[in-house]
Image (tube, rainbow, N blue to C red):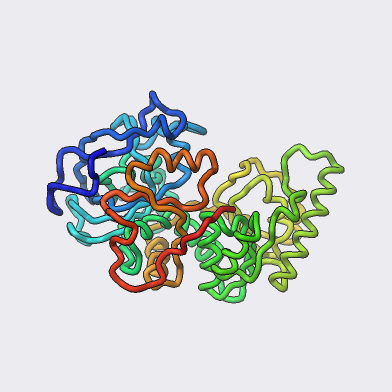
Amino acid sequence: MADVSKLDVAPGELPEKMAAWVIRQEREGEPTDAFQVEEIDVPQPGAFEVIVRVMAAGVNFNNVWAALGKPVSVFGYGDHPEYGHHIGGSDASGIVWKVGDGVTKWKPGDEVVIHCNQASYEDVEVHGLDPLAAPSQQIWGYETTWGSFAQFTKVQAQQLLPKPKNLSWSESSAYGLTYFTAYRMLMDQCKLQAGHNVLIWGAAGGLGVFATQLCAAAGANAAGVVSSARKGDLVKKLGAVDYVDRNEFAGMMRKGGETPDEEKARFKESRGFAKRVKEILGDAPDIVFEHVGQATFPTSVYVVKPFGKVVICGATSGYTLDFDVRYLWMRQKQILGSHFANAYECMRANQLMAEGKIQPVLWKVMGFDGVAEAHQLLHENKHLGKISILVGATSEEEGKEEDGPGAIRAEVGA
């Protein structure tokens, strides 16, 4: 494989071709088959667009789905019909290389991280409501083809944020998608405040490690649900009051189709779990941070205090939810849906990262030749945390310009 860290052009100039990990519809399947390195034409920036030289790229589960073509193939929507190929990657750090017409805030040579939300400038929702409400809203590197697993990527100028100087290229590529999602869930959807009690499912996972740190930074009290004592120790290190090992309450998990007797037994386990959470926090949680779905949602609705909020951004265990709605209406609880974050939220969250108040949690850094392997690890659940891919950068330490805490290197998982 060619050395992707070397370029023959200066900032402001683009080469004709670049190396990219490409998925094509005819080879959808296992990530190690679907992802292949190809030489691709380098895109030119349109109006309000920027071409970024990718220095490092973060790996997320969305491009396992893109490789598999399941549950939905990416090729039927976004800009894929126009280009016919998919370059994945929804997290990146890099250097602005060329700007399109109308871009005034950024110039070639600027060091940036990229958030993954795109929307059309012409949609009215962008101007006064929220870009997440725009009909054109899509996730860069999943619903669009020009993702970060290539020497260059094409983004909207509004996606750019200043790269924290206290982090290396690899560290700063490893947090955007999950951290910004957790930030919107807690800070904006739930109005997190000092003194709030928060229950975090999967507290040692990709979302949970940031939810836990945000609670600590805000002066809130977090109880994390994890699957082992080792992960519990990490969650406490990140600022949680304490943790619950979910294996102690395995019977509370909803599988679907329970008989009345099975449901009675399940509910008894949930009551025991709620009691444990209350012991840790001193009271029932004001907020439950949800992304598990079917298995945990009945317990979430039950355990949150009256007038409390359950905020959910995904459903890894299943999206068909079945819960006792009496605990919702009679105790006046709220369920809030949340999806990624807007540019302003991303900017505020990124400032906390630059100030060292929140840290990335990184498991492994791999070379550019590891893109397919990294996604295969995710697909087979053999990864132990966040993976960063070096593209333009040649070492894990490259790019760090100021002292700071940097990333926490840890094996993580829900």
Residue at image location 23% in from the left, 49% down from the top: 5
In the picture, the quarter occupied by the N terminus is: top left
User: How far across and how far down the image is residue 226, in percent?
Assistant: 64, 57
Residue 269 appears left or right of 247: right
Image coordinates of residue 348 in percent, x first then y, are 40, 67
Q: Name the residue rendered at 72%, 65% in the picture.
A: 277
Note whether residue 329 is visible. Answer: no
Name the residue: 77% across, 55% down.
270
Q: Is residue 268 visible?
A: yes
Q: Residue at x 32, y 45 (%)?
A: 368
Q: Is residue 370 left or right of residue 246?
A: left
Q: Position of residue 271 (x, y in %)?
A: 79, 58
Q: Residue furthest right?
A: 261
Q: Which of 295 and 247 lies nearest the eye of the viewer?
A: 247
In this rendering, the answer to whether 135 lies above or below 37 is below
Is 203 positioned to the left or the right of 342 in the image? right
Q: Which residue sits furthest top?
A: 26
Total marks drawn?
0
Judging depth in this view, the residue of 23 and 182 nearest the camera is: 23
Image height check: is 202 above or below 380?
below
Relative image position of residue 394 (x, y in whole percent): 27, 53
Quarter of the image where one finds residue 257: top right
